[in-house]
Amino acid sequence: MTRVFNFSPGPATLPEPVLRQAAAEMLDWHGTGMSVMEMSHRGKEFISIHAEAEADLRELMGIPANYKVLFMQGGAIGENAIVPMNLIGRGGKADYVVTGDWSKKSQKEAKTFGTVNVAASGEAGKFTSIPKQSEWKLDPEAAYVHICSNETIGGVQFHWTPETGNVPLVADMSSDILSRPIDVSKYGLIYAGAQKNMGPSGLTIVIVREDLMGHALPITPSAFNYQLQAENDSMFNTPPTYAIYIVGLVLKHFKAMGGMAAIEAHNKAKAKVLYDYLDASSFYKNPVNPADRSLMNVPFKLKDDALDEAFLKGAQAKGMIQLKGHRSVGGMRASIYNAMSIEGVQALVAYMKEFEAKNG
Ligand code: PMP
């Protein structure tokens, strides 16, 4: 068996030991004679899996006791509506900081549910940098301020936490959750689809400060009502049980890697290998302001777009896949989440050098 180096932005590569363990437990989880997929979500076996995943997430991220962890469905695009439905009721207005395609989508969807103010936007600069907070036009009466901590398409990432005073900060962390230590208490709500850094698609994690719940608009579907989900331990409807199980295994793996500080160091080391080479080369170019570069998603262009296809084909032949950039920006993108090894990044850079030497 040969595993590829998978640079997909998501669903993305997962830690191999996790996949092996899931395979070993597929038919008979811990002597129960059944797969996790076949278990009742209300049975004691699954309840223990669910509780352990939540406890490990709380430990890894240092989630304070006054925050609920919800395991939901609908993905981050679902949350683009679910967040305003649950939070905008406190005053009817929200601020959005637009730093790329994903936060732009969030902002657009929120308009259905209330008054949306774009407090800052990086669009004039083609989303290659994060607008400085001194330029943001925040409304002190907004129900919340929404950001996307890491723009998966453009490859820009917040390396600082905005100060929003008494207005709760809401972050779409789909593509950088669990990639570095963060101070959860600085946020009112964090949400993330699982399929990049945590596990399979189908599961959305929501971490919400308790006092923000209970203001859902009357149109909010019950399954998407944070308060109802919190009261029912995320079991108001059947949760995505297998995805929760895999995320639980991934969290144990992250703990074994040494937790968030060790993982951040690993991610920084990997990203440095790639950015150092990109900056030294005149053949490849990353357009992002160095201070705002993502450690997770690294877009780059070749000197000549006409070479893109040959680049991708050559990479594929060497077992490196999913390097094509998003259709809206073109070029290439290497997604290097926690589960991507430094060997994977080194192999990519070695191939890029070889390709440059042939075509430069
Ligand atoms: N937000 C961000 C930052 C993302 O990267 C993605 C997925 N690429 C989404 C939202 C949308 O996620 P989903 O398709 O799971 O709803």
Image: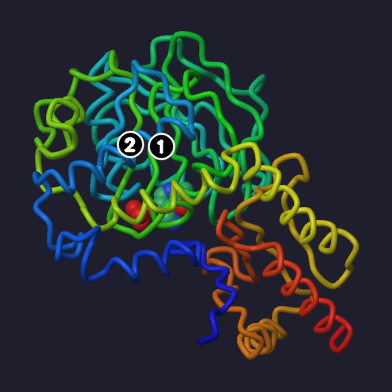
Amino acid type shown at disc 2: Glu
Circle 2 is placed at which residue position? 54
Ligand 1 contact, mark 1 (Cβ < 8 Å) = no
Amino acid type shown at disc 1: Leu
Q: Are marks 2 and 1 in contact (CB under 8 Å)?
A: yes
Q: Nearer the viewer, residue 27 or 121?
A: 27
Q: Nearer the viewer, residue 252 or 147?
A: 252
Crowd tier of the residue under label 2, counting other residues whose Cα lies within 10 Å: few below 14, some 14–19, many 20 or above: many
Residue at image point 33% right, 36% down: 54
Vertical relation: 54 (above or below) 33:
above
Circle 1 is placed at which residue position? 57
Left or right of 338 on screen, residue 287? right
Most extreme residue toward the front, as rendered?
31
Quadrant of the drawing holding the C terminus = bottom right
Q: Secondary structure at mark 1?
A: helix
Residue at image point 42% right, 28% down: 170
State the image coordinates of residue 146 (x, y, percent, origin top left): 44, 30
State the image coordinates of residue 323 (x, y, percent, origin top left): 60, 73
Residue at image point 67% right, 69% down: 344
Question: Rounded to the nearest whole Å, what is the CA distance between mark 2 and mark 1?
Answer: 5 Å
Q: Nearer the viewer, residue 339 or 12?
A: 339
Quarter of the figure with residue 275: bottom right
